[in-house]
Amino acid sequence: PAEKTALKERIKRLLKEREAVLVAHYYVDADLQDLAEETGGCVSDSLEMARFGRDHAAKTLVVAGVRFMGETAKILSPEKRILMPDLDATCSLDLGCPADEFTAFCDAHPDRTVVVYANTSAAVKARADWMVTSSIGLDIVAHLHAQGKKILWAPDKHLGSYIQQQTGADMLLWQGSCLVHDEFKGVELDLLKAEYPNAKVLVHPESPANVVAQADMVGSTSQMIAAAVEMDADTFIVATDNGILHKMRAAAPGKRFIEAPTAGNSATCKSCAHCPWMAMNGLQNLADVLQNMNNEIQVDPRVGQLAVRSIKRMLDFAA
Ligand code: 13P
Ligand code: SF4
């Protein structure tokens, strides 16, 4: 603990010296989330991370999250320096949607409006008409559907099916998934609910349909935390990466939060619902990038100029 405290103090000092600001996602290590809050940065969902990075005056942002979050920050603010603790922190959705295959898919369906999830590469965003995050995807697709548009959706099939079911839009779905949320199990959740009949179930829409169907509330990480505070219940079952529990417990003290079951939830694996790429962000590599000012995110400016249109459409819609 003494070592940890010293490392945190060093990071705080370096953030000041480098005039840098820390932007963290709810799935990263609790210490990083706390540091972001204590130092005037932000800890949030993907939409708010993008907005905060765009609006903050700092010339250097350190993004504690996964690669697409750093790339979105860079695309929105090409003049800023965007650093990440580990540039190899990726996402199964991004990996499962290579730009060349995606482009061919879009080319084969020119009559469809292309809507992509934030969890994609800059090149995929460059081919899209709209980029959305989990907090606003449903509203944007409902808006496009009302205009009579047919949608090509990528890459998350569960989020896509959920939005399709909620809006009735005509959606052609890419078949990607998040390796964390894909593991939540509907049958086991049903059994857990029987054990805690008064519990409310909070679900991230990257989860499979038979998990989403049992939800009292479906939404982005920020929306799930808000629901934990606002909903009148003392026990919650939470189906998303367990990194979120730190903030939920702080925001709703006295309430009880239980992880939704995954195939691996057992005596040997108590915390399977945790993204291995989010877990690559730690105090030591955060201190190192601030010390060395390395691990800078680069996006080809030509790709960035195309990708920024789909991101700005979402931010304008959200405003
Ligand atoms: P949100 O925080 O936007 O809900 O996204 C979750 C996610 O997939 C981050 O990896
Ligand atoms: Fe990607 Fe899932 Fe990890 Fe989020 S939790 S970064 S969606 S693999």
Image (tube, rainbow, N blue to C red):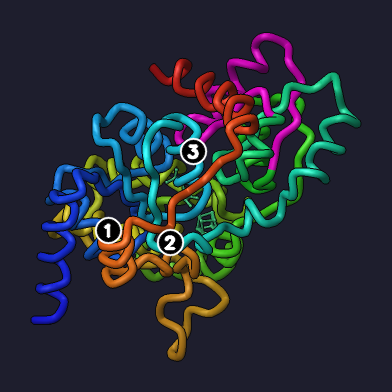
Mark 2 crowd level (few <14, some 14–19, many ≥20, 10 Å Cα):
many
Quadrant in which residue 282 is drawn:
bottom left
Is 187 located above or below residue 159 in the figure? below
Of residues 195 and 46, the one drawn nearer to the viewer in this rendering: 46
Where residue 73 sits in the image (x, y, percent)?
A: 43, 38
Q: Find the magenta span and give its range.
A: 128-154
Q: For the N terminus, which image quadrant?
A: bottom left
Lateral position of residue 267 relative to residue 103, left or right: left
Earlier-in-chain disc, 3 versus 1: 3
What numbered label is drawn on residue 241? 2
What numbered label is drawn on residue 72? 3
Give yes or no for residue 56 being in the magenta stretch: no
Question: Which numbered mark, 1 or 2, is in the foreground of this view?
Answer: 1
Q: Let me know if residue 257 appears in the view.
A: no
Q: What's the residue type where badge 3 is placed? A: Thr
Q: Let me know if residue 234 appears in the view.
A: yes
Q: CA distance from mark 3 to mark 1?
A: 20 Å
Is 92 located above or below residue 228 in the figure? below
Cβ of mark 2 under 8 A from ligand 2: yes
Earlier-in-chain disc, 3 versus 2: 3
The residue depicted at 79 percent of the width and 34 percent of the height is 172
Residue assigned mark 1: 290
Q: CA distance from mark 3 to mark 2?
A: 21 Å
Q: Is mark 3 in CB contact (under 8 Å) with mark 1?
A: no
What numbered label is drawn on residue 144? none
Of residues 134 and 39, the one drawn nearer to the viewer in this rendering: 39
Q: In what element is the residue under mark 1?
A: helix
